[in-house]
Image (spheres, helix red, strand yellow):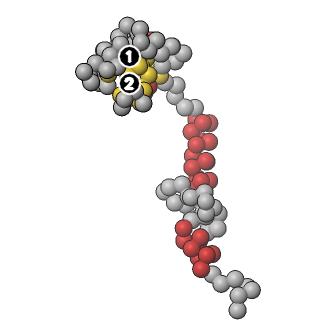
Amino acid sequence: MYLARFDDPAGVRFGVPTFNYRHAPAGLATRRQLAAKGLTPGRQPIAGQILWRRGKRVAYLYREDRAVPKREATDAQLAALLKAWAALSTCPTCGREYPYYLPRRFGECADCHETAATAPTEGSR
């Protein structure tokens, strides 16, 4: 039966308790589920796993009661992130700041890149 393919709550076959997709017991959560609650696994070991897509995808489960609150970023860390955002979203050629990261392959905004690509070179007459 497909639903019971990966069901191994005792952890005999896979070495860790394994559950089917959307069938994990209450009290166990993935990293994303913990993060949505403002928690992080901390240093606790993996308490289980969920397998799906014929065993090619895995999500590790952690105990919610042993999870710890996420740390808040310091003012210095937030300032560094803002500085990095400004550097990665400002065109070095025209100095315009965009609301997104500029493509690294061009090294400048699309307008400046297109202008440089279509401009005639000195040697071409």
Q: Earlier in the sequence, mark 1 or mark 2?
A: 1
Viewer-proximal residue, 80 or 13?
13
**Mark 1 is on which residue type?**
Thr
Direction bottom: furthest residue = 125
Callout 2 secondary element: strand
Name the kind of residue labelled 2 in the image: Leu
Left or right: 11 with respect to 42? left
Front-most of residues 113 and 83 = 113
- Residue at 73% of width from left, 85% of height from top? 122
Between the residue at mark 1 and the residue at mark 2, the CA separation in whole angstroms equals 7 Å
- Choose top left, top right, bottom left or bottom right for residue 7: top left
- Which element is circle 1 on? strand
The residue beneath circle 1 is: 18
Q: Residue at x 37, y 29 (%)?
A: 54
Q: Viewed as shown, does residue 101 lie left or right of 64?
A: right
- What quarter of the picture does the C terminus occupy? bottom right
Whether residue 64 appears in this view of the structure is no
Asked where in the image residue 61 lies, by quadrant, the reply is: top left
Quarter of the rendering containing residue 55: top left
Residue drawn where x is 38% and y is 16% of the image: 18
Q: Position of residue 79 (x, y in %)?
A: 59, 42
Asked whether the residues under the numbered discs 1 and 2 touch, taking CB atoms below 8 Å apart as contact, a structural biologist would say yes
- Residue at numbered disc 2: 51
The 10 Å Cα crowd at callout 1, few under 14, some 14 to 19, many 20 or more, is many
Quadrant in the picture for the N terminus: top left
Q: Which residue, as the protein is rendered here, is positioned at the far right?
A: 123
Classed neighbour count for the residue bearing mark 2: other residues with Cα under 10 Å, few (<14), some (14–19), many (≥20): some
x, y percentage for residue 22?
A: 29, 24
Residue 37 horizontal side relative to residue 114, left or right: left
